Amino acid sequence: MERIPAWSLAVASMLAAQLGAALSVGLFDDVGTAGTGWLRLTLGAVILVLIVRPRWSAWSWPRVRGPILLGVVSGLMTLFFLAAIARLPLGTAIAIDFLGPLTVSVVLSRSKAAIVWPVLAFVGVLILTQPWDPEVDLVGVVFALLAGTMWGLYIVLMQRVGDRYSGLEGLAVMMPVAALTAAVVGVPQAWGKVTVTTLLVALVAAILMPVMVFAFEMLALRGLTAAAFGTLMALEPAMAVVVGAALLAQYPGVDQILGIALVVVAGIGAERVGRRTAPVIEPPAG
């Protein structure tokens, strides 16, 4: 994985996230938005634990605090985001959601010249979001803003966890915590409604998001600064619009296409100035 460019892992994670989101929309009527999030995270946790097989007995409290906090944030991020896309078009929800990573890129970027990329991305996000439209669902906007807040925290925490623990060890500890966080509201919604078909669709969605997304993002954040990664996520609204049009018949207008162009340029510019030196990884627990 070290030879794969960090930016390509980030792009792959975004594509997997949007495909997983599109699949998840079909589960909302069956098990609810929170139930969908809980199923995805639980199945993802099972997959990662079976693959990584972390040695739980070797984990002390100081070592496990980071993954636990990341798990709580990831669980909340998933619930808020699914609640948002239940009310808003996928591209619009992602555009609002992106304000979290955008804030990270502005706060953490040390290059004055690099500020131009978040500013350009912000303009693109405004065009995509169109907050001046009176038909925008305000509850959906609030959910998207909450998801964006969690997304910004997630980027910072994911980088720290990815830097400290080798392979996907930290991720395998974090994922069950995310599933438990989502279970608080997800289990009551999904109780008695889960069928074999629902499980199969949720399994495919879980492989895409969270398994592939979280794994690719953790690896990408070992090669990019959090600031660059946050702005590179500007590509995600563009991907969301494309996936929304292809799979959910949510077609963009001319103004949205303009917004896509702006965020794509911002994402490319951020990646060029945001490479990291390789972090020092702690040895595996035990």
Image (spheres, rainbow, N blue to C red):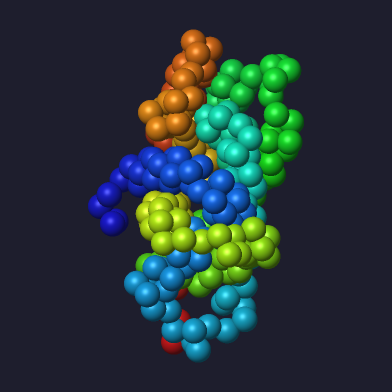
Residue 134 picture location, percent across and down:
73, 17
In the image, residue 220 sits, relative to residue 58, either above or below, namely: above
Residue 161 picture location, percent across and down:
52, 64
Observer able to see residue 138: yes
User: Is 61 on the left-hand or right-hand side of 276?
Assistant: right
In the image, residue 107 sits, relative to residue 135, either above or below, namely: below
Number of numbered callouts drawn:
0
User: Is 78 on the left-hand or right-hand side of 2?
Assistant: right
Q: Residue furthest top?
A: 254
Q: Locate the N terminus and report the quarter of the image it occupies.
A: bottom left
Q: Locate the C terminus and report the quarter of the image it occupies.
A: bottom left
Which residue sits at x=49%, y=10%? 254
Question: Toward which corner of the image does residue 69 lie, by quadrant?
Answer: bottom right
Question: Toward which corner of the image does residue 207 lie, by quadrant?
Answer: bottom left
User: Is 50 on the left-hand or right-hand side of 39?
Assistant: left
Residue 216 picture location, percent across and down:
39, 53
In the image, residue 90 sits, relative to residue 54, either above or below, namely: above
Residue 27 picture location, percent across and down:
50, 48
User: Is 25 on the left-hand or right-hand side of 69?
Assistant: left
Between 15 and 157, the residue placed more toward the observer is 15
Which residue sits at x=61%, y=69%? 180
In the image, residue 247 sits, relative to residue 282, either above or below, namely: above
Q: Residue furthest left?
A: 3
Observer able to see residue 227: no
Which residue sits at x=44%, y=26%? 249
Which residue sits at x=53%, y=57%? 158
